[in-house]
Image (cartoon, helix red, strand yellow):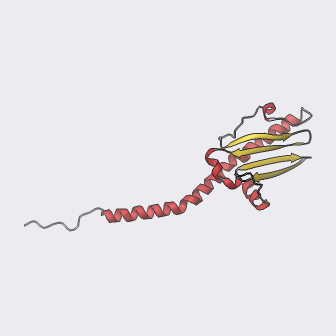
Amino acid sequence: MPRADLTARGFTLVEMLVVLLIVAVLALWAWPAFHGHWLRVRRADGLLALMQLQQHQARWRTDHPAYATAPELGVPATSPQGHYRLTVLQQGPAGYLLQAEAQGGQRADSGCAVLQLRLEQAHTSTLSRTVTGDENPEPANRRCWSR
C-alpha cells in the first residue's frame, strides 16, 4: 500500500489568513501617517502658487500705481497641480491679500485648507484658516506654512 507524503509544500488557508490579517493591521496603522504626509506634500503646491502670485504682483506694481486683480495679472485660477484655487481678495496701492483655497482631496487638510499671503505697508505676513474658515492660532499657522 502506498505511503502518503507528509512533507507536502505550500501554505494552509489559516496561514494565509494570518498573513493577510497582519498586513491589514500594518496598513491601518501606517495609513494616517502616510495620508498626513501626502497632504503636507501637496500643500507645497499652494505655497508655491502664492509665492508665484506674489512675484507677479511685484512685477505689476513696478509699472502701475496699485497692485492688480487676478484678471489683470492674467494668472491661472488654480495652482500648478490643481490642488488650490487662487484668488486676489484685496488689492490697492499699499498692498494686497492673496489666497489659496484647497480643492478636491486636498480639502482633507482641514487645519490648513486656506492659505493667505498679505502685503501691507511693505510688510508680508502669512495666514491660514481651517476648512470652516476659522483663523489658525500662531502655532498652527506656522505648521501650515512650514515646508
The C terminus appears in which quarter of the rendering?
bottom right
Q: Depth check: 129 or 63 in front?
A: 129
- Say which quarter of the image contains residue 49: top right
Give how far across and how far down residue 43 sits, in percent: 68, 50
Q: Residue at x 59, y 55 (%)?
A: 35
Q: Quadrant of residue 98?
A: top right
Residue 97 picture location, percent across and down? 83, 44
* Residue shown at 58% from the left, 59% from the top: 32
Left or right relative to 146: residue 15: left
Q: Residue furthest front?
A: 132
Residue 34 appears at what percent x and percent y? 58, 57
From the viewer's perspective, is residue 100 above or below residue 76? below
- Residue at the spot 33% in from the left edge and 65% down from the top edge: 14
Task: Give residue 9's position: percent from left, percent from top.
Answer: 26, 63
Specify the quadrant that holds the N terminus.
bottom left
Q: Residue at x 46, y 61 (%)?
A: 24
